[in-house]
Amino acid sequence: MADWTIDWPAYAPELAPWRTTIEADIETTRQTIARLVPPSRLTVQVRLEPERVIPELGMVGHCYGPEGFTLSVAPRNPRFALALEQGALRRQVAHEAHHCLRNAGPGYGRTLGEAFVSEGLAGHFVHRLYGTPPEPWECAVAEGAAFRRLPDDAALAETGYDHAGWFFGVGGRHPRWLGYTLGYVIVGRWLARAGEVDGPTLVNVEARDVLAAVRSAA
């Protein structure tokens, strides 16, 4: 694993039975990504953190910057084994690797609109790599209904937006995962207009260009 380093907990015997599979999935994903965009050096921090995972998967990724991301897993979660078998970990790794690559370029962004675009790009990056359908959080709301909730330009430009509310449904103002769904829809509509873009563009396109294209087509 020349370009990626895996950092394991000093003591986590619960992870031992899964270590070989997790390492293989991370390496497979690294190789798959390298066929689409130039290789990068990343650190993947595997952590036993059952309180952080997506309950439906027993795992979740979190990018902390251009240098790497955390992959939290919960092997005792009753859905973990099946999710792992069905490729969920590879897709989580690809999603977070996209965030790292984007952080090394234009950045994740500070505004609501930029967050929509960054999450949508990561989702479509995974789709490009694996040909998989949207994740549950990327189709949590019907496409038309989600797009009708797209905020106006002033709201999209806000830096003090409620990320937990938009993306996780905290506070009850928005459906759970609406932000991820909106991001996936926005980027999907941009791609429908832009056509087949290359891997670096799918990482580094400016959020304002994606949003402008989608607004003009609305």
Image (cartoon, rainbow, N blue to C red):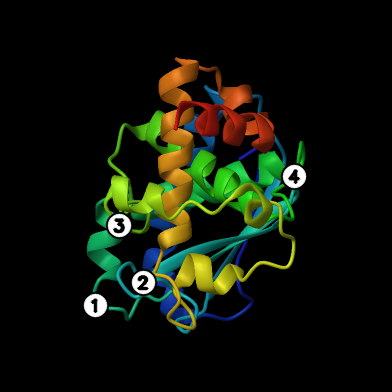
Verify CB contact (< 8 Å) between mark 1 and mark 4.
no
Mark 3 to mark 2: distance in Å? Answer: 22 Å
Residue 41 position within the rendered picture, expressed as x and y whole percent measured from the top left: 72, 40
Q: Secondary structure at mark 1?
A: loop
Nearer the N terminus, badge 3 or badge 2? Answer: 2
Front-most of residues 114 and 197 = 114
Instruction: Please name the residue that numbered disc 2 is placed on.
Output: 58
Nearer the N terminus, badge 1 or badge 4? Answer: 1
Mark 4 to mark 3: distance in Å? Answer: 27 Å
Image disc number at residue 141:
3
Question: Is the C terminus in the top left, top right, bottom left or bottom right quadrant?
Answer: top left
Verify CB contact (< 8 Å) between mark 1 and mark 3.
no
Above or below, 71 relative to 213: below
Residue 84 position within the rendered picture, expressed as x and y whole percent measured from the top left: 31, 58
Mark 1 to mark 4: distance in Å? Answer: 35 Å
Whether residue 106 sits left or right of residue 15 in the image: it is right
Verify CB contact (< 8 Å) between mark 2 and mark 1.
yes
Above or below, 19 relative to 107: below
At x 34%, y 75%, the residue is 55
Verify CB contact (< 8 Å) between mark 3 and mark 2.
no
Image disc number at residue 212:
none
Residue 218 makes an appearance in the image: yes
Instruction: Please name the residue that numbered disc 4 is placed on.
Output: 107
Q: Secondary structure at mark 4?
A: loop
Please rate how many residues cluster around mark 1, counting C-alpha atoms within 10 Å: few if below 14, some from 14 to 19, many from 20.
few
Nearer the observer, disc 4 or disc 3? 3
Nearer the N terminus, badge 2 or badge 1? Answer: 2
Instruction: Please name the residue that numbered disc 1 is placed on.
Output: 78
Residue 53 position within the rendered picture, expressed as x and y whole percent measured from the top left: 44, 74
Please rate how many residues cluster around mark 4, counting C-alpha atoms within 10 Å: few if below 14, some from 14 to 19, many from 20.
many
